[in-house]
Amino acid sequence: MLTQNKLRVYLSITLLASAAWLLHGFIPAMLWAVVIVIATWPLRARVEDKTKFGAAGVAAVMTTLVAILFFFPVGYALFHAAAEASSVAHWLMGVQKTGIAVPEWLPGITMVGGSAADWWRENLSDPAALSNLIGQTDNAMWAEYARMFGAQVAHRLITLVFTVVVIFFLYQDGEDLARKTLGLLDKLTGESGIRYGLQAAVAIRATVSGLVLVGLAEGLLIGICYALADAPHPAILGLVTGVLAMIPFAAPIIFVVVSGILLVQGSMAAAISVFAFGMVVLFIGDHFVRPKIIGNAVKLPFLWVLFGILGGVEVFGLIGLFVGPALMALVMTMWRDMTESS
């Protein structure tokens, strides 16, 4: 009997490993689907109560909402990126004939302004020097980068479509799947396993709220600042800022670039205002609002939330933004159980 149990365990592990190997290319999509469904399950319950639809109808409504939420920003960003790429190409063609004039504010910078202006005149204002500088890039290299970028975009879109399909079935059969999962955890680990499973769901939901909602709110506020500062395309820049604000220390990349653009355009006051306002918004959101949302829900110090986010991104990619804090919350729950029971 003992040998039979061992063989059953080995067979189960072999089957699970084989399935993981077979589906490894789709694991990120399935993880994204699980995170999204767990985070939006309260909304699904509300839709079910209001509409009285069956499981398939509620799943269709929720999947449509999620698909719109995903596809519209992506399509909007790709459309404007294509338009901007065309504008940048025309601008490059024009400046190769006329050169780029030295900004009026550049010579006024203390100590380095004069030498910087001289370098600008020699390399950027002179059309021949600028054409030579741009011509030093390898066209084959840019073509390879374009090919790789196109392949990555196609792969991401396929993953996105597969994620939406998985989301539909999770919305439809999620209650039965959750019940069976908790039953399996109870059978394998007892009451503690059920508690850990529920804690993981709470951690994922709190992390999504803390990262996504706070990040989008930061992007909205900084986007309004872009518009008031007369930055180019404030809506798309605000959207990108909001997306990057979900990742710690990533959002400053955008508003620093925007500040640089405003400086080049000669709007020093607007550039300083954008940078200062962006730093203030991020400081408040990342140090006060986000820790309160995530930490209070999972009883996890924000330092460990930060470690979970950064470590999760490094190991799992973007999905690690949500998996990492959930793992840290489980570890902290296990630690409390061990220390309190002792």
Image (tube, grey):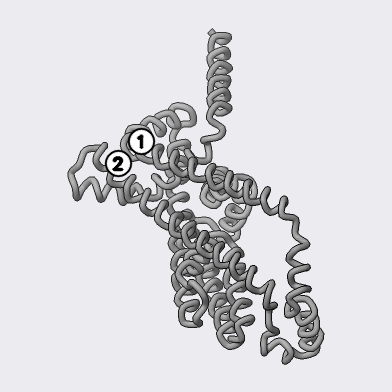
Q: Residues within 10 Å of mark 2 (few under 14, many from 20)?
A: many
**Quadrant in the picture for residue 186:** top left
Is residue 269 found left or right of 143 in the rendered image?
left
Q: How many marks?
A: 2
Q: Residue at x 46, y 49 (%)?
A: 204
Q: Residue at x 35, y 35 (%)?
A: 169
Task: Work out whether 224 lies above or below 73.
Answer: below
Q: Which one is nearer the viewer's eye here, 111 or 20?
A: 111
Q: In the rendering, which numbered label is found on residue 268? A: none
Task: Work out whether 210 lies above or below 8.
Answer: below
Q: Which residue is mark 1?
A: 169
Q: Residue at x 54, y 67 (%)?
A: 286
| Contact flag, marks 2 and 1 (Cβ < 8 Å) | yes
Element marked by disc 1 = helix
Q: Which one is nearer the viewer's eye here, 122 or 253?
A: 122
Q: Residue at x 19, y 47 (%)?
A: 51
Q: Residues within 10 Å of mark 1 (few under 14, many from 20)?
A: some
**Quadrant in the picture for residue 185:** top left
Element marked by disc 2 = helix
Task: Work out whether 20 lies above or below 157.
Answer: above
Q: Earlier in the sequence, mark 2 or mark 1?
A: 2
Residue furthest to the front = 97
Instruction: Give the x, y percent position of residue 177.
Output: 37, 33
Q: In the rendering, which numbered label is found on residue 59? A: 2
Instruction: Give the x, y percent position of residue 18.
Output: 56, 22
